[in-house]
Structure formats: structure tokens, C-alpha cells
Image: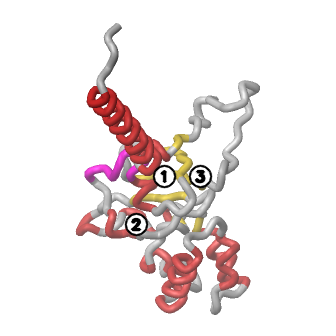
Amino acid sequence: MPELSRSQIAVYGAVVVLLLLLGARAIRAEGSGGSGYEPIPDISSGEASGGSGGFSLDSAGGDVVVHVAGAVARPGVYRLPTGARVTDAVARAGGPSGAALLEAINLAARLADGQQVVVPKAGPGGTPLAAAGGEDGPISLGTATAEQLETIDGIGPVTAQKILEYRDGQGGLASVDQLDKVSGIGPATMESLRARLQP
């Protein structure tokens, strides 16, 4: 085999360094892109991580596990990195469907472990169907609007706004019981909240 000149060695070395840099950049891009999200096994089909039929939804490594429902392409339970926002959960669920009313939810809110993100469908006049339906179903604590909260007994505009400010200030809420720290909410109102809200 012929001996390589210094210029050839320099060219080969530069190519190797370039390939290493491109590889590192690709790995970094994958770490910050969509592959940082890990879907949770489908519980309804019995798919689990244990083989014995049991399943675990415990957060690993500080991640949060959220349920994305409503007007999205792939509703389901997903694991996302700590600090992820509602918009990240919607994107992970395949994005909003054509009937989604994204203006009705706070896409910038931080996700909390165990939270359900419900993307409402647009009803007549562009109003969320969940709000138009009134008492038909539970309201998602993580995505509730002031108008939806005001449909709950004992909640007026001022208290609804306090709840939203408290939720956003905490970066989301994992339990309805956390609302007892909001001023103006007593035991009777807490019972109404527990009956109408879900995490």
C-alpha cells in the first residue's frame, strides 16, 4: 500500500472531524426534537412493560405522564420531558384535528404529572363544545377556561380568574385538591370543584 502524503492525511483528518461534528449535531437535534417524547404502552390493549400483565405509569427521570384527549390526531397517554408545555403534548398526540378549537386552551401552560389535556372541538359559533354542553362531562383542570369554571356552583368570574392564575403560577396542577389554597374557595366550593373537575 502506498504511503500517504501529509496533505492527504490532513484531508482525511478533516473529513473525519467533519463527520464527527455532523454526527454530534444530529444526535443533539434528535435529543431536542420529537424523539425526546416516549409514548406510554396502550393500557386498554393490555400492553405493558412487565410481561406479567401489570403496568406502571410512574414518571422516570423527572418526566411527566399526561393524557391527551379530545380533538387531536392520536389521543393517548404520553411521557414528556419535565417543563414541557401543553403545546408539546398536543404535538406529541399528532397535532390538532380539523375541528380543534386551540384558542380555548392555554397552549403555553406547563404540564403537570398526571394531567389530562383536553383539546375541545369547535361548536356552533366557534364556542367549545365542552362549554356549550354544560354539565355533560367533567372539565379538565389543566385546560379549563374561565367560562368553563364559571359553570361550576360557587365559582364566579373573580374566583375563576384566581384559579387560572394559581394554576398557571404553579405550572399546572396534578390534583383538584390543590385548589384549596386559592383564597375564596371553602369546603362547599371544593366539593363542587371535585364533582365537576378532573386533573
SS at circle 1 = strand
> Relative to residue 92, is residue 14 depicted above or below?
above
Residue drawn where x is 42% and y is 78% of the image? 147
Q: Which residue is mark 1?
A: 68
Q: Nearer the viewer, residue 163 or 90?
A: 90
**Segment tinted magenta in the rendering:** 91-98
SS at circle 3 = strand
Q: Which residue is mark 2?
A: 107
Report the Cα–Cα distance between label 1 and label 2: 13 Å
Report the Cα–Cα distance between label 3 and label 2: 17 Å
**Visible residue check, residue 93:** no
Q: Nearer the viewer, residue 9 or 181?
A: 9
- The amino acid pointed to by label 3 is Val
- The amino acid pointed to by label 2 is Leu
Q: Which residue is mark 3?
A: 65
Which label sits in the foreground, 1 or 3? 3
